[in-house]
Amino acid sequence: MLDKMLNAPVIAKLLQSHLFKAMDKEQFNQMLGFSRLKSLKADQMLFQQDSKLTHIYYVLDGAIKLCRSTRKGDEKIIEVIQAGKSFAEGMLFEGSPKYPVSSIAMRDSIVVRIEARQYLSILKSSNSLCINMLGHLSKRLHWMLTELDKQTLHNASFRIIDYFLSQVADEEHSVYDLHLTIPKRDIASRLSIKPETFSRTLKSLLKKDLIDIEDSHIILKDVQQLRKMVELEEI
């Protein structure tokens, strides 16, 4: 039965996702039948690390952090999933899949839950859908290798500026006002930087006149210059 909350605007957004855009009308309607909207409060857990994989997810609104934790309670943020992105699909092809990370809402969020077994069944019925998924997973692997390089081969200044630039939505202006929608401590964790190092590095970038800081806003003084500095690894 179709979830009544999956209305026309929601469906239009789903059709833009790599998870669904290669489906024909029959496959897409079948997928909608085992998909449900779920609302999450800030800091609410969606699933826990090492629990059995039952669903894959599409973020309709908000932001979800994927993180791993130690027995001592230390947390490392692997990725922050923003609206319009999906997660957990990479585990579909394991024999007895488990979630390798925990997922927690960073603010009030809405996700679409898709039953994993049913989605996998649709994939198995179509070679083109499988190839589309393999292409997506290959891009994800390339992205992860790039992130590994950044976090192991570059200093904190490089990682922070590179992250800020990845959030720039408008290239028309040289000065960009970046509103940080997630806490600085979480950005630090995502970049594998200690919070105190993150704070010191921001102050250093401020002194170099590369950025300004206004509460939760980071003003990038010259986007083009910063991109060139990152490209030449001169930060």
Image: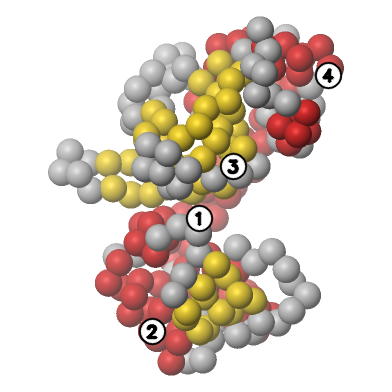
What whole-number distance in Å separates the C-alpha atoms at marks 3 and 2? 32 Å
Q: Which mark is residue 164?
A: none
Nearest to viewer (mark 2 / mark 1): 2
Q: Circle 1 sits on which residue? A: 147
Instruction: Name the residue: 43% across, 47% down.
Output: 106
Query: What's under tag 2, amino acid-wise?
Result: Lys
Whether residue 49 can be seen here: yes
Whether residue 152 can be seen here: no
Instruction: Name the residue: 35% across, 71% down.
Output: 198
Q: Circle 3 sits on which residue? A: 61
Q: Which mark is residue 203?
A: 2
Q: Circle 4 sits on which residue? A: 24
In the image: residue 156, left or right of residue 37 = left
Q: Secondary structure at mark 4?
A: loop
Q: Residues within 10 Å of mark 1 (few under 14, many from 20)?
A: some
Instruction: Name the residue: 15% across, 43% down.
Output: 72
What whole-number distance in Å separates the C-alpha atoms at marks 2 and 1? 24 Å
What whole-number distance in Å separates the C-alpha atoms at marks 4 and 2? 52 Å
Q: Residue furthest right?
A: 25
Q: Give the quarter of the image for residue 185.
A: bottom left
Give coordinates of residue 172: x percent, y percent: 78, 75
Q: Quadrant of the N terminus?
A: top right
Q: Residues within 10 Å of mark 3 (few under 14, many from 20)?
A: some
Q: Secondary structure at mark 1?
A: helix
The disc, 2 or 1, on the residue closer to the chain's N-terminal end is 1
| Residue 134, above or below 82 | above
What whole-number distance in Å separates the C-alpha atoms at marks 4 and 3? 25 Å
User: Do the CB atoms of the residues marked 3 and 2 lie less than 8 Å apart?
Assistant: no
